[in-house]
Amino acid sequence: MCVKHFNFSNVSVVVKTLKNYEKVAAQLIKENFPKVEVLPSPLNFSGLILVESKVKAKHEELAEEIKAKIPEVEKAFPVKKHVDAKLDNIVEASKELASFLEDAKSFAVRTVRRGSHDFSSMDVNVRVGALLKGITGCQVNLDFPEKVVFVEILGPHAYLGIVDGKEFPKKMGKGKVEVRSYFRKVSLVQMPYLGSLGASKEMGNRVGREAQTFEVGELVIAPVGGVDAKQLNAFLGGIFEGIESRYQIQARTYAEKPIRTRVYVQNLYELVRERSSEPIIVFEPEGEPVNKVAEKLAELTIKSKRVNFLIGSREGIPHGIFRFAALVIDLCPGVTIATDLAAASALTALAYALHKKLTRNKR
């Protein structure tokens, strides 16, 4: 629909989509709801569609139907109020939302601001939140609010409404326990993948990315006996490239600074002798299924300063080392896990074991 003929003041639902999916989702909405007008990418803001209903129906019902029928829609917010995008106007309009918070135990305000304004999204959140709390007595809960007052600002337009708090899920939701810090106790002991220089480097890159993804305390490349120096060098080069590439992504996206995994080289037998007083966990098909030993795996990790995860390569961990292991674990009975997946599989198993243990302890 042409922007000139779209009535911005009569918007019923603000729809959010993945970037570059606006036109696809808008067409699907139009096909499923013939009595609406749609405007994808309003004012050139991506990931948005404005929907105007031509029939007298509750905006909440329309939003729910859109979500139920069209998976290309990420969110659909029913609009209660439209005002000019000025801070005082938004705050004044929010008074009319107070009645919708009467039965709520808690709320939060979420503002997304697009365009240039003389106020910030935080300014809106603070003033609207303070006003509604003063009117209703409803408590503000920024982590897990029962209701969310949304303010969607598009250039000169501001749309307000209320949705269920579940519309804004958190990665660390209720019932979840942070396990990331425990990976710093892990010494990932990896036998090197040796072969052609290209294959060795590629495999090293994948292993390095896995180690850095979990931010393990250290990665020890542990050969057995003499190995080809060029092949080992290629594997190590890949390790450092993999760690660096993943670290740079984490540095850009994490709220806190990530921990860069340290890398060492040590003969496998020497390492086992040196760390015989520490928990040594071997991951090989001869071991117990992970579900049977998850409790002990979690306990060893929680109580120890360092826990050593031994991962094989083309050849598995030598059987003589099994006698020195606190646990020998089979990650997937009947399946031989490829070298580039083994470390991640072991660390994911640890995450499962830790989460199960820690959530049980919290009860």
Image (spheres, rainbow, N blue to C red):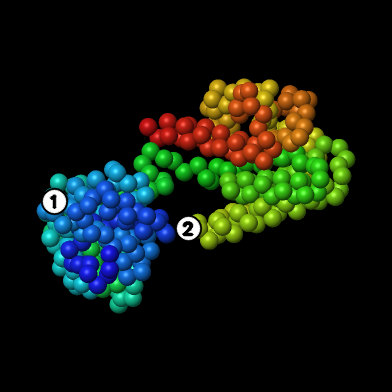
Question: In front: mark 1 or mark 2?
Answer: 1
The residue type indicated by label 2 comes to: Ala
Badge 1 crowding class, 10 Å Cα cut-off, few under 14, some 14 to 19, many 20 or more, is few
Task: Say if residue 190 shows up in the picture.
Answer: yes
On-image quarter of the C terminus: top left
The answer to whether residue 359 is left or right of residue 273 is left
Residue 24 appears at what percent x and percent y?
Answer: 37, 55
The residue type indicated by label 1 comes to: Ala
The answer to whether residue 260 is left or right of residue 169 is right
- In terms of secondary structure, where does tag 1 sit? loop
The answer to whether residue 114 is left or right of residue 200 is left
The answer to whether residue 302 is left or right of residue 338 is left
Q: Which mark is residue 255?
A: 2
Badge 2 crowding class, 10 Å Cα cut-off, few under 14, some 14 to 19, many 20 or more, is few
In the rendered view, would you say 21 is above or below 356?
A: below
State the CA–CA distance, disc 1 to disc 2: 42 Å
Q: From the viewer's side, name the closer residue of 96 and 2.
A: 2
Task: Say if residue 123 shows up in the picture.
Answer: no
On-image quarter of the N terminus: bottom left
Residue positioned 29% across, 46% down in the render: 67
Q: From the viewer's side, name the closer residue of 276 and 266.
A: 266
Q: Which residue is mark 1?
A: 57
Residue 235 appears at what percent x and percent y?
Answer: 76, 48
In the rendered view, would you say 40 is above or below 192?
A: below
- In terms of secondary structure, where does tag 2 sit? loop
Residue 117 appears at what percent x and percent y?
Answer: 31, 76
Q: How many dots with numbers?
A: 2
Q: Which mark is residue 273?
A: none
Q: Earlier in the sequence, mark 1 or mark 2?
A: 1
Residue positioned 72% across, 48% down in the render: 202
Residue positioned 78% across, 37% down in the render: 268
